Image (tube, rainbow, N blue to C red):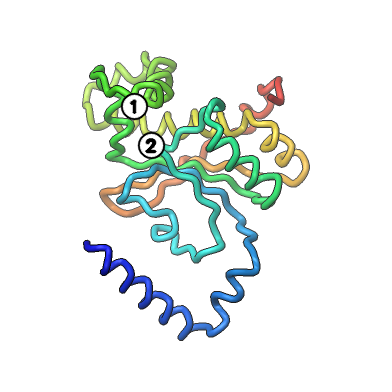
């Protein structure tokens, strides 16, 4: 798609929004109060707003390769801090997806240069769960299982942050583990119970 087409699409979108509500953009400019922080993958096929039918202002979104939440990454840590402390979101969603290139790359031993340190986060998830993963003979099922494990471990990383722990105590903030099935378009709630994780977290930082 040429860049000219993108601007045409934008003008069409503006006209459609103004037709629905002449004050749409003036309202949008007043500020944001999203209920959700969405942490997902940068994959071009996975759009948070599109697959949830969300409008601008309803989701605070952070995306990176394979929806990773390392405590050494100032970017994602800053997003969590801003969303929880200043925007007062009450829900944090970590959403992975099947057919994830980052997960697939992490399962291989090839040298991917600058990507190696980032993929190490996912390879650590594999290492932590190696016995159960290696029982799975079918590579596609193993791939999907690692996608789900990665979502769970990144949720645990979210729960380790002081801001999130404080918000859980103060206003009942909830963390959700989801997977987007790219084959069907459906969102899957892994329905993980993080209460035991929260109870076992001894340190705030």
Above or below for 53 versus 121: below
Secondary structure found at label 2: loop
Q: Are marks 1 and 2 in contact (CB under 8 Å)?
A: yes
Structural crowding at the residue carrying mark 1, measured as other residues with C-alpha within 10 Å and reported as few (<14), some (14–19) or many (≥20): few
Secondary structure found at label 1: helix
Structural crowding at the residue carrying mark 2, measured as other residues with C-alpha within 10 Å and reported as few (<14), some (14–19) or many (≥20): some
What percent of the width, then of the height, locates residue 32?
Answer: 62, 61
| Quadrant location, the C terminus | top right
Chain-order first, disc 1 or disc 2:
2
Kindly identify which residue carries mark 2: 65
Q: In 3D space, how far apart are the residues under numbered discs 1 and 2 (Cα atoms)?
A: 10 Å
Question: Can residue 35 be seen at all in this image of the molecule?
Answer: yes
Task: Describe residue 198's horizontal placement relative to residue 119 as left or right.
Answer: right
Kindly identify which residue carries mark 1: 115
Task: Describe residue 50's horizontal placement relative to residue 87 as left or right.
Answer: left
For the point 60% across and 69% down, which residue is it? 29
For the point 25% across and 21% down, which residue is it? 108
Query: Which quadrant of the structure image shows residue 6?
Result: bottom left
What percent of the width, then of the height, locates residue 47?
Answer: 38, 54
Outermost residue to the front: 4
Query: Which quadrant of the structure image shows residue 96?
Result: top left
Question: Can residue 178 be seen at all in this image of the molecule?
Answer: no
For the point 31% across and 40% down, which residue is it? 98
The answer to which of 172 and 114 lies nearer the viewer is 114
For the point 48% across and 63% down, which residue is it? 54
What percent of the width, then of the height, locates residue 126?
Answer: 38, 20
The answer to which of 15 and 155 lies nearer the viewer is 15
The answer to which of 42 and 95 lies nearer the viewer is 42
Q: Which mark lies nearer to you, 1 or 2?
A: 1
Indicate which disc residue 190 carries: none
The answer to which of 83 and 25 lies nearer the viewer is 25
């Amino acid at each position: 798609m040429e860049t000219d087409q993108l601007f045409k699409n934008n003008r069409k979108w503006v006209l459609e929004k103004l037709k629905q509500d002449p004050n749409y953009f003036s309202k949008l400019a007043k500020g944001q109060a999203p209920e959700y922080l969405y942490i997902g993958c940068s994959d071009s096929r996975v759009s948070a707003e599109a697959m949830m039918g969300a409008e601008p202002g309803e989701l605070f979104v952070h995306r990176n390769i394979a929806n990773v939440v390392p405590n050494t990454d100032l970017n994602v840590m800053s997003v969590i801090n801003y969303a929880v402390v200043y925007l007062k979101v009450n829900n944090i969603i970590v959403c992975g997806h099947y057919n994830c290139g980052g997960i697939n790359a992490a399962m291989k031993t090839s040298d991917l240069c600058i990507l190696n340190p980032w993929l190490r986060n996912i390879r650590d998830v594999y290492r932590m769960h190696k016995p159960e993963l290696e029982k799975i003979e079918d590579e596609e099922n193993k791939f999907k299982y690692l996608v789900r494990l990665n979502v769970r471990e990144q949720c645990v990383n979210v729960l380790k942050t002081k801001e999130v722990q404080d918000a859980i105590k103060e206003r009942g903030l909830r963390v959700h583990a989801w997977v987007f099935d790219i084959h069907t378009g459906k969102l899957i709630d892994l329905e993980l119970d993080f209460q035991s994780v929260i109870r076992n977290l001894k340190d705030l930082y």
